[in-house]
Every structure is written in structure tokens, then in C-alpha cells.
Amino acid sequence: MIGTRPNLAYLKAAWAAHAGISAQNCHQSYEEAGISFERVNHSCIVRKDDMQVSTMPLRHTRQELRMGFLGRIELEARKAAGEIEAVLMRDLALPEGHLLMVEMEESMRHLRRRGSRALAIFIAPTAAADISSRFGVEIQAFLDAPRACLYAHALNGDGYAAVDLLADCGKRERHPRAATYGELAQRIVATLNAALEKAVLLR
């Protein structure tokens, strides 16, 4: 049975392997990138240091290897994203007239095409929201390790950010890190619930 929790050690190694032969490192040798290959029958096991990060045909290009990394990364990233989404859906106290949007598929497309590491999540007002109590929240949850960046504002009548709801929060609240994605989501919930509750009471 495939595990439902992301393999954090794999994500760390696979992202490092991808970075080692991409962008400014595109001309770096496999040895310099810490990538090794072991032939097994008609395929080869790809390792980053001691962690298996992919399985490839014996004949492949560097671009095919990069895409192979991202394909395997996406499988684990979806588990991480699902873990975050489940906690937010269960525990986040949305203000009346607001909805939670987890841009799962769009974020996965960016991962596959550009190697993007972020899952974009938003809280936005609907047409039914009271114009005097509208809030905008953006969560950038990273898919290489359990960490995130939070942005939350009260919106003015034109829908633009007016008041920073996290102005009194420290760096650990604005940029939370955790040991697991479930724990990260709980930290996000705690920070946003407190900020939104306070903002609603002050309106």
C-alpha cells in the first residue's frame, strides 16, 4: 500500500538532485552534483548521495533525468499538499462570506514545467462578504520541506490590501517551519485563526 504521508527525506534528496543539474548548475557533472547510477538489468537506479531518487532507462538525457526527478517529486508533493489541505479544511475558521482556495493542480503544473516548489493557497471574500469585513490571505507552502510564508490583510472598499493582520506576529508565525506537513498546517491554522478572529472583533 502506498503511504499517504510524504517521504521528507526523499523530497530533500530529490530536490537537491534536481537543483544539482539545473539552472546555474546545468553544466555540472553528475559526480559534482552528488548523483550516481547503478545498473540493474535494463534500467539504472539513480541516487543522490545514498538516497534513491529515480529509476531511469539505461540511455537517457539530462533533460529526461530532470523531468524524471520532477515526476517522482510530484507524487510526494501531492501527499504533502493533501496533508496541508486536510488540516486547513478541518480546522481553519473562515470569516463569514469567505472561501478557501487550494490551487493544487495549478501548483503541480508549475512544479512539472518549471520546478516550482510552492503550493499556493488563498482565502478570499465572496460576493456575500460584508464590505467592511473582507480579508485576503495568501499562503505559500513549500514542497521541498515543511515551511511556509503567510500574508494576511484586511481589504479596503476597492479590494486592495489595507491593514497587515500579521503585523504583530514574529518571524516564526509569518514564516513557519515544522517537522511534518501536518504540524506545519497546524501552525498555519493557529496563526491565521488568531489573526482573523482579532480582525473580525475589531471591525
Image (tube, helix red, strand yellow):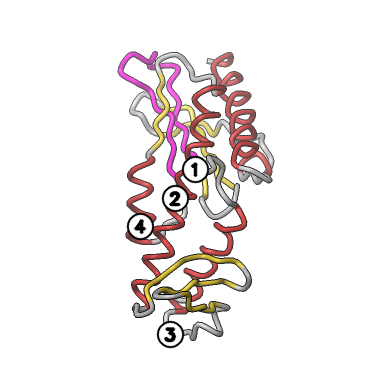
Q: Is the Cβ of the residue at disc 2 closer than 8 Å to that at disc 1?
A: yes
Real-space CA distance between mark 3 and mark 4, rounded to the nearest whole angstrom: 21 Å
Name the amino acid type tagged 4: Arg
Instruction: Provide the residue span drawn in magenta.
Output: 119-140
Extreme residue in the front direction: 41
The residue wearing badge 2 is 75
The residue wearing badge 3 is 27
Magenta segment includes 97: no
Real-space CA distance between mark 3 and mark 1, rounded to the nearest whole angstrom: 32 Å
Quadrant hosting residue 63: bottom left
Q: In this view, does 71 lie to the left or right of 180?
A: left
Q: In this view, does 14 lie to the left or right of 113?
A: right
Q: Dot 1: few (<14), some (14–19), or many (≥20) neighbours within 10 Å?
A: some
Q: Is the Cβ of the residue at disc 2 closer than 8 Å to that at disc 3?
A: no
Real-space CA distance between mark 2 and mark 1, rounded to the nearest whole angstrom: 7 Å
Q: Which of marks 4 and 2 is in front?
A: 2
Q: Nearer the viewer, mark 2 or mark 3?
A: 2
Q: Nearer the viewer, mark 3 or mark 1?
A: 1
Q: Is residue 26 left or right of residue 38?
A: left
User: In the rendered structure, which disc, 2 or 3, sits on the residue that comes first in sequence?
Assistant: 3
User: In the rendered structure, which disc, 3 or 1, sits on the residue that comes first in sequence?
Assistant: 3
The residue wearing badge 1 is 79
Badge 4 marks a residue whose secondary structure is: helix
Name the amino acid type tagged 3: His
Badge 2 marks a residue whose secondary structure is: helix
